[in-house]
Image (spheres, rainbow, N blue to C red):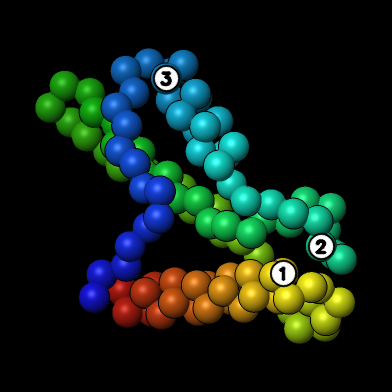
């Protein structure tokens, strides 16, 4: 089946200010926490698809910000919740890698 994205929304922005506000809103929705390696470790992925139109012309820009992969040695001291999150992050990165490989 097709991948699904939790919390996906499509928003029309009619100005630079609208766009900046939406990017800030998306950034605030990101999940982060302290780990043994980083003070503020990303625990989620973010996808921004910008479609820019001018008259009858359009262009598209896809911005992807991925949570970092979790190394076993770095997550050995994590509690059960952080270990589950790390496993889910790694699984989602593997799925994304397979999507890119399928496109090649």
Q: Nearer the viewer, mark 3 or mark 1?
A: 1
Residue 97: horizontal and vertical position, in percent? 46, 76
In this rendering, which labeled residue sits more in front, label 2 or label 3? 2
Relative horizontal placement of residue 13, taking residue 38 as reference (left or right): left
Q: Position of residue 18 (x, y in %)?
A: 42, 20
Image point (73%, 76%), residue name: 80
Asked if residue 87 lies left or right of residue 71, the reply is: left
Seen in the picture, residue 96 relative to 13 is either above or below; the reply is: below
Residue at x-position 44% and y-position 77%: 95
Element type at mark 2: loop
Q: Where does the C terminus fall, quadrant-wise? A: bottom left
Image quarter of the N terminus: bottom left
Q: Is residue 94 visible?
A: yes
Query: Can see residue 74?
Result: no
- Precedes in sequence: disc 3 or disc 1: 3
Residue at numbered disc 3? 18
- Residue 101 versus residue 38: which sits nearer the camera? 38
Q: Residue at x 31, y 74 (%)?
A: 103
Q: Which mark is residue 82?
A: 1
In the displayed structure, 34 sits above or below 93; it is: above
**Residue 49 relative to residue 72: left or right:** left
Callout 1: few (<14), some (14-19), or many (20+) C-alpha neighbours within 10 Å?
Answer: some
| Mark 3 crowdedness (10 Å alpha carbons): few <14, some 14-19, many ≥20 | few
Mark 2 Cα within 10 Å, few/some/many (few <14, many 20+)? some
Give the residue pinned by disc 2. Answer: 35
Task: Name the residue rendered at 42%, 44% in the picture.
Answer: 48
Disc 1 + disc 2, Cβ < 8 Å = yes
**Which secondary structure lies at badge 1?**
helix
Cα distance in 3D space between marks 3 and 1: 35 Å
């Amino acid at each position: 089946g097709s991948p699904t994205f939790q919390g996906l929304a499509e928003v029309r922005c009619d100005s630079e200010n609208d766009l900046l506000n939406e990017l800030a809103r998306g950034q605030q929705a990101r999940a982060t926490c302290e780990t043994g390696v980083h003070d503020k470790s990303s625990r989620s992925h973010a996808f921004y698809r910008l479609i820019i139109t001018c008259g009858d012309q359009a262009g598209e820009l896809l911005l992807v910000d991925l949570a970092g992969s979790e190394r076993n040695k770095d997550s050995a001291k994590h509690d059960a919740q952080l270990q589950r999150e790390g496993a889910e992050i790694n699984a989602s990165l593997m799925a994304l890698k397979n999507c890119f490989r399928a496109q090649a």
